[in-house]
Amino acid sequence: MRKRAYDPELAAIVPQLPVSTDWSDLTAARRAMAEMIQGLPAGGPGEDRVRFADRVIPGPADAPELGVRVYEPAGVPAPRPGVLYLHGGGFCFGSIDFEHAGCVATADAVDAVVVSVEYRLAPEH
């Protein structure tokens, strides 16, 4: 069997990844992802240079509100370019919390406002 090599930046989280996930059980897979997020270190590079806030966008009468997290480089005068960030997970998994560090890093690196959407997940929606 061939030994797997990991990028040194990722090696620390590899032991936290689930060995096997039954993707046919969405509830269990989402729970496994949430537990993995809780085990990750808080913050990340650039967090001291980026402000972020959770906001709610009202939905139409027949749909719930939509959560977003807005990241803005601190001390950078407006206007700035914007980036719409849709978290990973194939529209069935994931969350804005899972992608927090990446959004902070993006806002910091490109001096842009990043809006991460907590979209409703399939197949429920």
Image (cartoon, grey):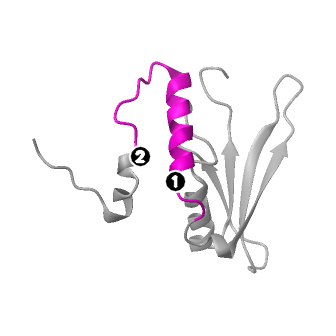
Q: Where is residue 46 in the image (x, y as percent from the top left)?
A: 59, 72
Is residue 76 left or right of 107 when viewed as pictured? right
Kindly give the residue lying farthest to the left in the view shown. 1
**Residue type (three-letter) at the residue carrying disc 1:** Leu
* Res. 99 in view: yes
Q: Determine whether the residue tagged by mark 1 lies in a helix, strand or loop.
A: loop
Circle 1 is placed at which residue position? Answer: 40
The vertical placement of 86 against 125, above or below, is: below
Residue placed at 59% from the left, 60% from the top?
A: 42
Residue placed at 78% from the left, 38% from the top?
A: 66
**Residue type (three-letter) at the residue carrying disc 2:** Gln
Is residue 67 left or right of 123 when viewed as pictured? right
Q: Determine whether the residue tagged by mark 2 lies in a helix, strand or loop.
A: helix
Q: Are marks 2 and 1 in contact (CB under 8 Å)?
A: yes
The vertical placement of 101 against 112, above or below, is: above
Residue placed at 82% from the left, 35% from the top?
A: 65
Q: Which numbered circle lies on residue 16?
A: 2
Question: Residue 45, located in which quarter of the rendered image?
Answer: bottom right
**Dot 2: within a 10 Å radius of its alpha carbon, few (fewer than 14), some, or many (20 or more) residues?**
few
Q: What stretch is highlighted in magenta?
A: 16-43
Residue placed at 63% from the left, 48% from the top?
A: 97
Q: Position of residue 57 (x, y in %)?
A: 83, 43
Residue sitting nearer the eye, 110 or 104: 104
Whichever of labels 2 and 1 marks the residue nearer the N terminus, that label is: 2
The vertical placement of 17 against 93, above or below, is: below
Q: Where is residue 77 in the image (x, y as percent from the top left)?
A: 78, 79
| Separation of marks 2 and 1 at Cα, in angstroms | 8 Å
> Would residue 22 be counted in the magenta stretch?
yes
